[in-house]
Image (cartoon, helix red, strand yellow):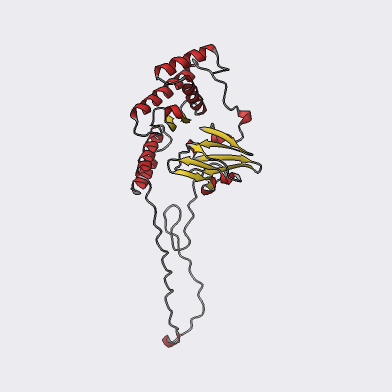
Amino acid sequence: MQGLSDDTRRVLGDIARQYGVSEDAALAMLLAVQRGQGTMAQFNIGELGGSGQWMLGGMTMVGDMFNYGLKNTVDGLCNALSQALSSGRIHLPSASGAASAWWPQWLGSPSSTGAQNDSAYAVFPSHRRLAIKDGGGVHLYDTGDHFISGVGQQQGSNTGLTFSSQYGSFSVSSLRHVDDGAPSPTPVAEVEAGGFHNDGSPAPSPQPEMADTVSIEPAAIPAIQPPASPAAPPATAVPMADSTAILALIEKLAALREAGILTDAEFTAKKTELLSRL
């Protein structure tokens, strides 16, 4: 624990002993809580079950998901460290000042950062964004419902980076590129003539110009064949997601709802979608 003040060393040591963990594990968790601004943490600490996540007032996830004793230890440890940080009993220098932040400012502070070869990455769970910086600039990706817990070895370009989530390993190339910035609502286009306006009122059908009346015998009208119905594309089997991962994801979504990140409607819609995969 070199570089820490005597007061910080003392408080950190007391917290480590209170929860029965080593001071090194407590320090590693302290850094993770600091990166999460005191309200969340993503960590990979062998002594605490490997990869896991914690959210203040929400859900705690550990590698051994059914080890409730470990969950309680991690939750208590993170809460104690968060309170010590917010009260000033523990002081650490800022992990990344504004001047060194290479990602767009609207993303705020990342839950985790790192670098491999000539590229760097930062994860922003509250915005569902993954930022990657390389020689071509900064690129943003929509992480969807992935909760990133680790990064793999880079293979080639930045799109060869692999990350791990509750669904296993996945590459950056599988994510949607969103360099246009923050997500915005898709405008509803007005339906063409014969449909409806955006306010729900019917749109008038265009009236064709009247030409000179021409008498046409019925026999002269060619038979019109209805267009052939396009062949329906073959149904693609959707692989059933691992039930344990789905239940863990629902728990995570519940935590996001409790934290005010998701609305009740968004939570219900996503929960229904996930349960349909079981």
Q: Residue at x 47, y 22 (%)?
A: 26
37 above or below 275? above
Residue 110 in view of the camera: no
Which corner quadrant holds the N terminus?
Answer: top right
Q: Residue at x 51, y 14 (%)?
A: 9
Left or right of residue 259: residue 278: left
Q: Residue at x 46, y 42 (%)?
A: 146
| Residue 52 image point, x, y percent | 43, 32
13 above or below 235? above
| Residue 271 image point, x, y percent | 36, 43
Nearer to me, 146 or 3? 3
Left or right of residue 244: residue 220: right
Residue 133 in view of the camera: yes
206 above or below 254? below
| Residue 95 image point, x, y percent | 57, 26
43 above or below 133? above
| Residue 150 image point, x, y percent | 49, 37
Count of numbered labels shown in the rendering: 0
Instruction: Give the residue at the far right of this rendering.
Output: 135
Nearer to me, 242 or 144? 242
